[in-house]
Structures are given as structure tokens and as C-alpha cells.
């Protein structure tokens, strides 16, 4: 029954992301990587002075709203982009909405949780794109 598990892609998400193809219990190979990982999220939020505790950053991200920060397909096209199969809710541009906000609007409308949620979403989206391309 265990042999039905193979092959699979194992993603190790720490400072960056490492991708391993696992073909058996002792048969695996690193097949790719990305510099975006947990350390990226923590480093950016620390640099911004938003957090001094990664646990608090994660808790705030749970309640954060990345749609205040990120642009979706719907934000760009006003609906789904059916011609290429993109639902309106799909992420189109991480931090894309901030380009149109003044510093005052950012400071009054955007929370640390919103930024943390956006950064985590960026890392997860990056991992999923890499995983799909590596797995093909």
C-alpha cells in the first residue's frame, strides 16, 4: 500500500522553499527551490517594524485582509477573465493596491495583519506555481 504514495513532491518551507521529488522511501532528489519562504515574511515584517514576535505576526495574519493590499483579477478587469480562465478572485498583483494609496491612507487603512497576510499569500502562491511547474 505504501508504494501507492510515490511519486510525490515534498516542499520544505523554511528560510526559502526547497522542492524534492520523492520516488521511494530512500529515493529522492532536490528538483528546485525558491528564495521566498518563512524568513522572507518574517524579515520584511521585522524591517517594517510591524512585529518583534513571529507568533503575533501569524496570529494577526489570520485576521488580516490581503484584499486591502493585493489586486485580484476582478480589480483589474472588473470580472472573471474568462478568455484565459481566470476567476475574478485570483491574485493578480501582490501589494498592487498600495501603489494607488497615499501614505496617510496606508497608515490609516492598512494593518500589520493585512501586510502579513499578503506576504504569506505571496509565499504560498509562489510555492504553488513552482510546485505545478516542477511536477509537470
Image (cartoon, rainbow, N blue to C red):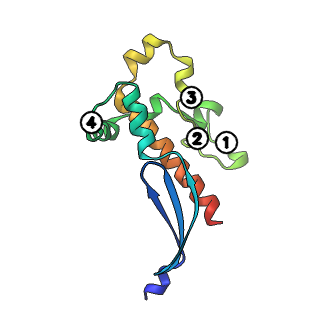
Q: Which residue is mark 3?
A: 96
Are the residues flagged by discs 4 and 3 in contact, CB closer than 8 Å?
no
Q: Residues within 10 Å of mark 2 (few under 14, many from 20)?
A: some
Give the spatial CA distance, label 1 vs label 3. 18 Å
Q: Nearer the viewer, mark 4 or mark 2?
A: 4
Alpha-carbon span between mark 1 and mark 2:
7 Å
Q: Which mark is residue 88?
A: 2
Calculate the distance from the C-alpha at mark 4 to the C-alpha at mark 3: 26 Å
Nearer the N terminus, badge 1 or badge 2?
1
Q: Earlier in the sequence, mark 4 or mark 1?
A: 4
Q: Quadrant of the N terminus?
A: bottom left
Residue 17 is situated, as x and y percent measured from the top left of the image, at 49, 53
In the image as oriented, which residue stretches furthest toward the bottom? 1
Give the position of the C terminus as an image quadrant: bottom right
Q: Earlier in the sequence, mark 4 or mark 3?
A: 4
Quarter of the view holding residue 112: top left
Mark count: 4
Look at 53% across and 66% down and name the residue there: 20
Counting from the top left corner in percent of width and height, residue 75 is at 58, 31
Q: Which residue is at 36% across, 25% downward?
A: 111
- Which residue is denoted by mark 1 in the rendering? 81
Secondary structure at numbered mark 4: loop
> Which of the two labelled residues, at mark 4 and mark 2, occupies the earlier sequence position?
4
User: Which mark is in front, 1 or 3?
Assistant: 3
Q: Circle 2 sits in a helix, a strand or a loop, which is it?
A: loop
- When the figure is inspected, residue 127 is found, relative to residue 71, above or below; the finding is below
Amino acid at each position: 500500500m505504501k508504494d501507492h504514495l510515490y511519486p510525490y513532491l515534498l516542499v520544505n518551507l523554511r528560510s526559502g522553499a526547497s522542492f524534492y521529488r520523492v520516488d521511494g522511501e530512500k529515493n529522492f532528489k532536490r528538483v528546485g527551490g525558491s528564495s521566498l519562504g518563512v524568513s522572507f515574511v518574517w524579515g520584511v515584517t521585522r524591517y517594517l517594524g510591524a512585529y518583534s514576535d513571529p507568533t503575533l505576526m501569524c496570529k494577526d495574519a489570520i485576521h488580516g485582509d490581503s484584499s486591502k493590499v493585493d489586486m485580484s483579477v476582478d480589480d483589474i478587469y472588473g470580472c472573471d477573465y474568462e478568455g484565459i480562465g481566470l476567476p475574478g478572485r485570483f491574485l493578480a498583483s501582490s501589494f498592487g493596491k498600495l501603489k494607488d494609496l497615499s501614505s496617510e491612507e496606508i497608515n490609516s487603512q492598512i494593518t500589520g495583519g493585512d501586510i502579513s497576510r499578503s506576504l504569506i499569500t505571496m509565499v504560498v502562491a509562489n510555492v504553488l506555481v513552482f510546485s505545478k511547474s516542477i511536477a509537470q
